[in-house]
Amino acid sequence: MQIAKCVIGNGRMSETGLYRHHFPELRHHSFSFFISRFSFILTRSMRPDQLAKPGLLTQPVYEPGRPIADVAREHGLDPDSVIKLASNENPLGPSPLAVAAARRALDDAHLYPDGAAIALRAKIGTHLNLDPAQIFPGNGSNEVMQVLAEAFVSPGDEVVMGRHAFIVFKYLTQFNGGEAVEVEMPGFGHDLGKMREAVTSRTKIVYLPTPNNPTGTANDAVDVVAFAQDLPQHVILCVDEAYAEFLDPDEAPDLRPLIAAGRNILCCRTFSKIFGLAGLRVGYGYGPKPLIDLLHRVRQPFNVNAIAQAAATAALDDREHLERTRDINDAGLKQVSAGLVKLGLNQVPSAANFIMFRVAKARDIFLALQAKGVIVRPLAPYDLPDHLRVTIGTTEQNARFLDALAGALGKKLS
Ligand SMILES: Cc1ncc(COP(=O)(O)O)c(C=O)c1O
């Protein structure tokens, strides 16, 4: 007998949920009842891969940073001794104000969230001086970009992105039948001239992550605005600002005037990085209202949960946590960068909270670090098989990473 595995989802219907939906009179029966009655349907049905949408079978699966518990189990380590420097999370943890707000929100967990995320959008609006109607809340900024691609990318469309840009852009494009047009990134930065040249009459979206993950490179603010201005009207520019808060305010491109002028620009931000709320999944996009209105047609009714909304709203008020995070990151960037220099490794100067560096036998080094309880990120999926990316941690975590790396390379730090 063939039984479909349950898939964990953000409120999407499970296999049994689907049966219950179609046969409401059977609502009170157990899972085994369904299996005993309907197993003949399962055994006779076509294989799921025969039913899948075109392209799904070749769709790559995103490889996240490995979880601490997983690595600890695999290597027989105490989970408390394992450090994760693999997903650009905040080493200080979440803002205490956010945690307190999340705890309070738990008391109302029996109620659906505010589907329109009114309080959160109002707070973001105040924070960025935008009309809340210009803000689109998402289950992480990943979801914002997923909704954008679902809303706009059709088979035959081209989507322009850097060759080593955040990989989700390529996956979303492919999933929606579009063609990913990958532009070379000399020196690992986005070449705006080359990207402009790659735009054709078939281009639907251009992605510009600044700073970019995994390279850590940021484009000049003035250049980004000029690039946005110069794009043809049939193109949507998606500026991924996941790490924008790590830039000095005058280094961060400000696309709000062009958005106000109605240009098709969607800027995406997240609470996963500097705000330390990656586990809650909350982010947002901002753009011209007509674009945002269309995105609302695609999202699930309650796409951002109530706990995340409360925490994110409070986090925006926690200037102290934000400043402390910036400070520890600035110091950590210097510490890790200096360590890599001592180890004779080439690195790409970073404007974010991680550093990409080149190392021979990167996969072996990644595994050796992992065995010592230090999780970093291998970059083969980014076409960078001889590079690793390390997130900036606390001073102690950075020192531990550098020690472990020196050990794995058979070198000394001093
Ligand atoms: C450049 C970039 N954009 C977007 C995201 C997605 O962030 P989230 O979905 O957690 O908001 C990430 C996460 O790693 C990222 O590095």
Image (cartoon, grey):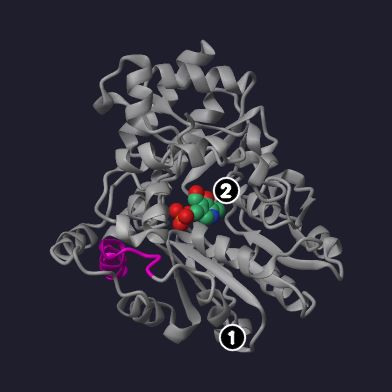
Badge 1 density bin: few <14, some 14–19, many ≥20, Cα 10 Å: few
Q: Secondary structure at mark 1?
A: helix
Which contiguous range is marked in magenta?
302-320
> Could you say where residue 379 lies in the image, as x and y percent from the top left?
61, 34
Residue 289 percent across, percent down from the top left: 55, 85
Determine which quarter of the picture holds residue 82.
top left
Above-or-below relation of 267 to 404: below
Is the C-beta of the residue carrying label 2 under 8 Å from the nearest atom of ligand 1?
Answer: yes
The residue tagged 1 is: 290
373 lies left or right of 250: left
Mark 2 secondary-structure assignment: loop
Residue farthest toward the top in the current orientation of the protein: 410
Q: Is residue 100 magenta?
A: no
Residue under pointer 2: 213
Q: Quadrant of residue 173?
A: bottom right
Determine if residue 80 is in view: yes
